[in-house]
Image (cartoon, grey):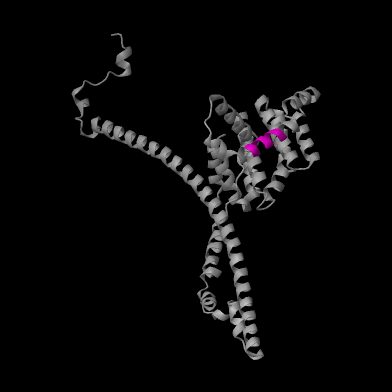
Amino acid sequence: MSAFTETALLKKLSELNSSQQSIQTLSLWLIHHRKHHASIVKTWFRELQNVSENKKLTFMYLANDVIQNSKKKGPEYGREFLIILPKVFTHIGESCFSEKLFGSLGRILCIWEERSVYEHAVINEYRSLLNKKHGSSGNSNFHKRDESRENVKKIEKRKHEDSRNKTRHMKLPHTHSEDNATKDSSEDVLQISPYIPHGEPPEPEELIKALLATENSASSDATVREKIANLPQEISDVNYLHKLEDKEKAKKLSNEVNDALTMLNDYNARLAAEMESRGKLAIMLRNFYVEQKELLTQAETRYEEYSKKYDKMIGVQKEIQEHISNLPDIAQLKDVTKLLAPLPSAGDLFNTH
């Protein structure tokens, strides 16, 4: 993942669009560079004030995505946005008039309230700041645009059911109306929370550490496995008990069985821990793969875009070179001024004689 610089951040914000992939990719990048959260949020707010109303909504979708999906790794973004959001909602409330913008912000606020992202009093403050300029009538209109909590719950429930039945639905034939319904559901989810990941991708150092840990796993402990393979047969054969003739041999066998049980219990515990670790590692690898695949898609798209620009520039360069080659070389032209009569002086021009 690319290093953080303010120039890189400004470039990414300028290229941000309302698609899920664009918001998701930038959100992952911001969460990865969360140690720069103060600078990132400050720059985000500065740029938000200078973009169109549609782009302001995209900026808010990005903030919503970062706030919600960074909670597992730390509260830095949640706290930083909490400081700046009053200014954000004041700015939007005073400078914007788009019904779509206010309606979508209302849905975001409902989601934050339902998921306890911020306290109820804080959410109400944001609503008030959005409507401060418009007064009581604006407040009434805003609440008409703002979806009810019950509608938000229905959307969340529908999203959960869609996720649970995804595999089954993919196997069924779709009608035109079903396709439209699915599309509408996706748009609702996009407007509320553009990206709900399976899990946050691990840091590369964390993944490398987990991979190295598998080198010393129980299943690769050849020494213990050889000891278990070489255990005497009599300690696991009940029929051998009939062959015991005295207490000394019985005690010796009992001690061997106890030692074998201790070794097997320890080894089984290590194997169980390894299974759990490998399960977690599999999830880490999946999430890391998903992130890298998304970044690869973005890189491929950008590569294609800049390749086209490069080809255009090559074409322009060739045309310029051809044009230059067709221009006369002024330095090699003969001095024709000596062949021309001298120009009349000012006195000659006004002399009537």
State the quadrant of the C terminus.
top left
Q: Is residue 237 left or right of residue 349?
A: right
Q: Is residue 94 left or right of residue 180?
A: right
**In the rendering, at what x and y percent does residue 245 appear?**
62, 89
Q: Is residue 3 visible?
A: no
- Residue beneath the point at 56% across and 62% down: 210
Along the line of sight, the residue nearer the viewer: 316 or 274: 274
| 344 versus 184 height, above or below | above
**In the rendering, at what x and y percent does residue 166 appear?**
58, 39
Query: Residues in magenta?
Result: 153-161
Residue furthest to the front = 242
Determine if the magenta segment contains residue 237: no
Along the line of sight, the residue nearer the viewer: 276 or 37: 276
Q: Main secondary structure of the magenta part?
A: helix
**In the rendering, at what x and y percent does residue 199 appear?**
60, 49
| 150 versus 69 height, above or below | above
Identify the image quadrant of residue 134: top right
Identify the image quadrant of residue 88: top right
- Residue beneath the point at 31% across and 12% down: 351
Q: Is residue 109 left or right of residue 184?
A: right
**In the rendering, at what x and y percent does residue 248 appear?**
65, 91
Q: Is residue 147 visible?
A: yes
